[in-house]
Amino acid sequence: MGLSWQQGPLAASAIGRFLVPEPLPQRLLFAEPLRRRMRVRFEGEWIADSEDVVLLHEPARYPVAYFPRAAVAPDVLQPLDTVTRHRDLGATSWFAVHVGDRTVQRAAWQHTSLPPYAGELEDRIAFAWRAMDAFYEEDERIVGHAADAYHRNDIRSTSRHLVVRVGDRVIADSVEPLVLYESGFAPRWYVPRADIDESALTPVDGQTFCPYKGLASYYDIGDVKGAAWSYREAWPEVARVRDMVSFEPDKVSVLLDDKVLSLEPGQKVTPHGIDRGLTADEITNEPAA
């Protein structure tokens, strides 16, 4: 997903390679100016606000935003005795974040012994995403993690014949599917509901969310659990797949032009790093600006 996540070019599981004579290091970190105004909200206050944010891309983690120390509100950061060591960036000092009567431990950090080649992060603070109330770009909330400029979704119409079966039962039959190409993932095929036997779909409790597409609802098909999903209120950026249904090719038979699809590398979502836990609550319980 994006530059360093899933199968992006800086990820450990990248499907492409750099055409260079010598192997690259197993871990490549990439820092760049975000070039967007970002703000952090905590306990009803803006505690950080800057147009000079640096985004750090680290293999197998979502992008992390680093704010200039001067852009953080006074008296918000309370130094802790906790010091950990980042495998690439050295000693990391931790802070509690305090506003009013509320204090959250280990809610922010700073790399304090950076190697010479990582000067972009000097005197910068990162905030634990879930410890804050919200992050914004200008006046719009960003959910999940800092937006990765290298992540994109491209949606294409096609007249290819897509059929979904469970045993002898045809669940879907369409010559008007859409294919969604998402950074770091193999293609996903979405079927209009008019081409689906919806009596075969049993909605299940629980949703997940994607920071780029919105809330996903899931369906069982008979005894096959989690066989399909739909972004019923997909975000405007991917509105073309709104309320369409996609099927898991490792759980049901999905045929494209009579060719059986299999679970390609990159189709299964890789669990994210320990710093984040993405839950649907980030959207359904979104606080007001």
Image (cartoon, rainbow, N blue to C red):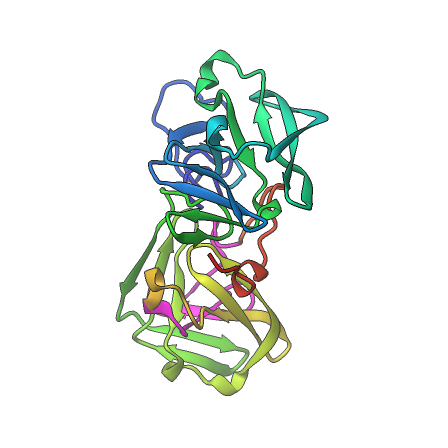
> Quick one: 267 or 234, which is closer to the camera?
234
Compared to residue 236, the image places residue 106 above or below, namely above
Q: Inspect the magenta stretch and tell me whether residue 253 lies in it.
A: yes
Q: Nearer the viewer, residue 242 or 142?
A: 142
Residue under the image location 40 percent in, 73 percent down: 244
Q: Is residue 148 magenta?
A: no
Q: What's the residue at 42%, 71% (across, down)? A: 233
Relative placement, left or right, of 154 versus 133 is left
Tell me where residue 136 appears, x and y as whole percent. 44, 48
Main SS of residues in magenta: loop
Q: Nearer the viewer, residue 277 or 139?
A: 139
Up the image or down, 248 lies above or below 166; here it is above
Can the viewer see residue 116 in this picture?
yes
Residue drawn at point x = 58 percent, y = 61 percent: 281
In the picture shown, does residue 279 fall above or below 106? below
- Residue at 29 percent of width and 69 percent of height: 160
On the image, the x and y values in percent for residue 120 come to: 43, 22
Residue 2, position as x, y percentages in the image: 41, 43
Residue extending farthest to the front is: 100
Q: Residue farthest to the bottom?
A: 199
Chain part drawn in magenta: 240-268
Seen from this angle, which residue lies furthest right?
81
Total numbered badges shown on the rendered structure: 0
Q: Examine the rendering and report whether any part of residue 29 can be seen.
A: no
